[in-house]
Amino acid sequence: MLLWVLNNIRHWLQSLSFRTGVIVLLSCIPFYTLSFAQVLLPISITAKGILWAVLFGLAKTCQYGGLTILGVEGYRRLRSRFMN
């Protein structure tokens, strides 16, 4: 059952456009920044740990979701745009 659900999510993500994939992939940058910048906040160590785990998890989710949306061909297309 779980494998079926994950497979459906993967197929749905792969059906999204290249532009959507780039936007999702780029949205991981603020989450990475916030996950490490929250160390400067004057809150408890426990709250910092929870905040870091949530923000870092969101960053990883955006990263892998964006790569799934782009796929291999989209990744090559994106890389070629930055190399030129």
Image (tube, grey):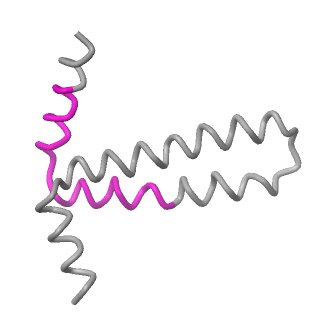
Residue at horizontal 82 percent and vertical 52 percent from the top? 41
> Residue 74, position in %: x, y?
15, 62
Residue occupying the far top of the picture: 1
> Residue 76, position in %: x, y?
16, 69
Image vertical order of residue 54 relative to residue 24, above or below? above
Q: Does the magenta-highlighted stretch encompass residue 22? A: yes
Residue placed most toward the observer, 70 or 20? 70
Residue at horizontal 30 percent and vertical 51 percent from the top? 66
> Residue 8, position in %: x, y?
16, 26
Residue at horizontal 86 percent and vertical 43 percent from the top? 43
Q: Does the magenta-highlighted stretch encompass residue 23? A: yes
Name the side, left or right, on which 76 lies relative to 24.
left
Name the side, left or right, on which 22 lies relative to 71.
right
Corner quadrant of residue 6: top left
Image vertical order of residue 68 relative to residue 78, above or below? above
Q: Looking at the image, how many numbered discs can be counted on the residues?
A: 0
The N terminus sits in image quarter: top left
Residue placed most toward the observer, 27 or 49? 49
Name the side, left or right, on which 61 lies relative to 13.
right
The magenta span reads 7-29
Residue at horizontal 20 percent and vertical 64 percent from the top? 75
> Residue 15, position in %: x, y?
11, 42
Overall secondary structure of the magenta section? helix
The C terminus sits in image quarter: bottom left
Residue occupying the far bottom of the picture: 84
Name the side, left or right, on which 3 lies relative to 48.
left
Image vertical order of residue 17 relative to residue 54, above or below? below
